Image: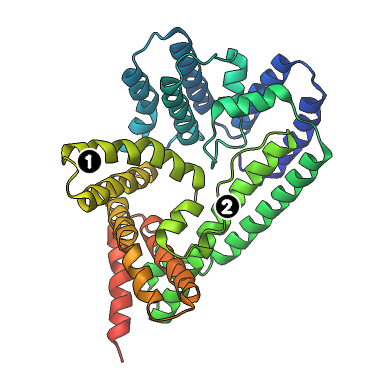
């Protein structure tokens, strides 16, 4: 069930007063879990919810009783998502974000093994808090669980939560309107002029941002209605002055997760392997591995490999481009911001066009039109 559907909002306006009315933490936890059941039932995906609940219980008891080895826990938690992705099978709704949140919890427990475990109902409600599991943000389970246990009630939460939801719905509507002129497989096959393709690329960047950040705003707003503050996931990414800055502003929680659990461990490993020589090569290899992870998480296709190569190249050349442009003008920001937008919007072509054949057709037509009189 989409967060924009009337049925979803009917359920929310019934659940929020019930949640705020309940005084016992256990009852609030059970209501959150019951809400998730309703959400998945209306989405016709109860099997997906069963998978998520099983994973959550497995991680909880595995960490509480220490009955599984650390590496085995990671493997078993990541296995369902990996299998669905590699077989190109439809991934159960929410499996990606719940998996990342559970893995973050396992990683955190390794660093603080003596920390107290919450009750199962509290842990499960934090892991399966339904507003975030569709499109993020990736949450820290213990933080969400603690907020549910405290139950913060305030008029400000209701006010700002409602405004966030309205803002998200507005963005989604903008995204829907822009999609008509954005890059898509149908227009690529039909053929476009070069100016039309340029407009389509710009529209694609705007559409991706409007859809993704709009959905996230709805999730953040819904959570705030319950008195729960989820982490920020976007910070005006298309005002970034370079590609590295863009990735600090876009899908912030995913970027932090990859940096903490992919980039930094691999960087340390590769640096030791190269005996701290060739630092640039280590940075390039680690960046490529990190971007490949993000790309292949979206889908096991050749497009995402090229997307990873493209972003790795841009990130590595960012300092040179910044320096070169800054040496020519005092107003480099007015050049770098639109340039970064165009570069990142162009990268979304690999995401939007599902096969490399379509990407090749799009690029070849563009090039051909450039050369034509």
Q: Position of residue 338 (x, y in %)?
A: 48, 72
* Residue in view at x 47 percent, y 23 percent: 51
Which label is found at residue 152?
Answer: none
Name the element at disc 1.
helix
* Residue in view at x 27 percent, y 56 percent: 309
Q: Position of residue 204 (x, y in %)?
A: 48, 64
339 in relation to 302, above or below = below
Is 15 on the left-hand or right-hand side of 253?
right
* Residue in view at x 36 percent, y 24 percent: 74
Q: Tell me the quadrant of the picture where the C terminus can be found.
A: bottom left
Label 2 Cα neighbours within 10 Å, binned few <14 / some 14-19 / many ≥20: many
Q: Tell me the quadrant of the picture where the N terminus can be found.
A: top right
Q: Nearer the viewer, mark 1 or mark 2?
A: 1
Is 272 on the left-hand or right-hand side of 89?
left
Name the element at disc 2.
helix
Tally of marks: 2
Which label is found at residue 271?
Answer: 1
Residue in the foreground of this view, choosing between 267 and 177 = 267
Residue in the foreground of this view, choosing between 164 and 372 = 164
Dividing the picture into quarters, in which one does residue 89 lie? top left
Label 1 Cα neighbours within 10 Å, binned few <14 / some 14-19 / many ≥20: some
Q: Label 2: which residue?
A: 213
103 in relation to 335, above or below = above
Q: Position of residue 275 (x, y in %)?
A: 16, 40
- Which of the two labelled residues, at mark 1 and mark 2, occupies the earlier sequence position? 2
Residue 14 visible from this viewpoint: yes
352 in relation to 275, above or below = below
Is 256 on the left-hand or right-hand side of 86?
right
Residue in the foreground of this view, choosing between 266 and 54 = 266
């Amino acid at each position: 069930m989409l967060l924009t559907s009337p049925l979803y909002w009917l359920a929310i306006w019934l659940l929020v007063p019930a949640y705020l009315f309940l005084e016992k933490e256990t009852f609030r936890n059970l209501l959150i879990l019951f809400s998730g059941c309703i959400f998945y039932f209306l989405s016709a995906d109860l099997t997906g919810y069963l998978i998520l609940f099983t994973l959550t219980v497995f991680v909880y008891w595995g960490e509480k009783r220490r009955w599984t080895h650390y590496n085995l826990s990671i493997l078993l938690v990541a296995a369902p998502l990996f299998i669905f992705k590699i077989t190109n099978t439809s991934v159960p709704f929410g499996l990606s974000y719940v998996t990342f949140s559970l893995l973050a919890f396992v990683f955190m427990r390794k660093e603080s093994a003596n920390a107290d475990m919450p009750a199962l109902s509290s842990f499960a409600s934090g892991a399966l808090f339904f507003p975030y599991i569709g499109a993020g943000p990736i949450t820290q389970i213990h933080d969400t669980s603690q907020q549910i246990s405290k139950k913060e009630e305030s008029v400000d939460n209701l006010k700002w939560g409602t405004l966030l939801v309205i803002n998200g719905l507005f963005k989604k509507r903008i995204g829907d309107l822009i999609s008509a002129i954005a890059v898509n497989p149908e227009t690529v096959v039909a053929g476009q002029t070069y100016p039309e393709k340029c407009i389509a690329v710009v529209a694609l960047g705007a559409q991706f941002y409007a859809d993704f950040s709009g959905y996230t705003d709805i999730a953040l707003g819904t959570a705030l209605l319950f008195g729960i503050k989820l982490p920020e996931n976007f910070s005006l990414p298309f005002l970034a002055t370079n590609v590295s800055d863009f990735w600090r502003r876009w899908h912030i929680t995913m970027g932090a997760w990859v940096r903490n659990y992919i980039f930094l461990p691999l960087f340390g490993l590769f640096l030791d392997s190269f005996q701290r020589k060739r630092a640039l090569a280590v940075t390039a290899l680690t960046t490529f591995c990190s971007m490949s992870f993000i790309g292949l998480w979206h889908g096991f296709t050749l497009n995402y490999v090229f997307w990873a190569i493209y972003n790795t190249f841009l990130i590595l050349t960012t300092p040179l481009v910044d320096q070169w442009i800054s040496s020519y003008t005092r107003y480099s920001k007015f050049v770098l911001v639109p340039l970064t937008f165009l570069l990142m919007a162009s990268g979304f072509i690999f995401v939007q066009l599902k096969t490399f054949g379509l990407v090749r057709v799009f690029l070849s037509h563009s090039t051909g039109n450039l050369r034509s009189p």
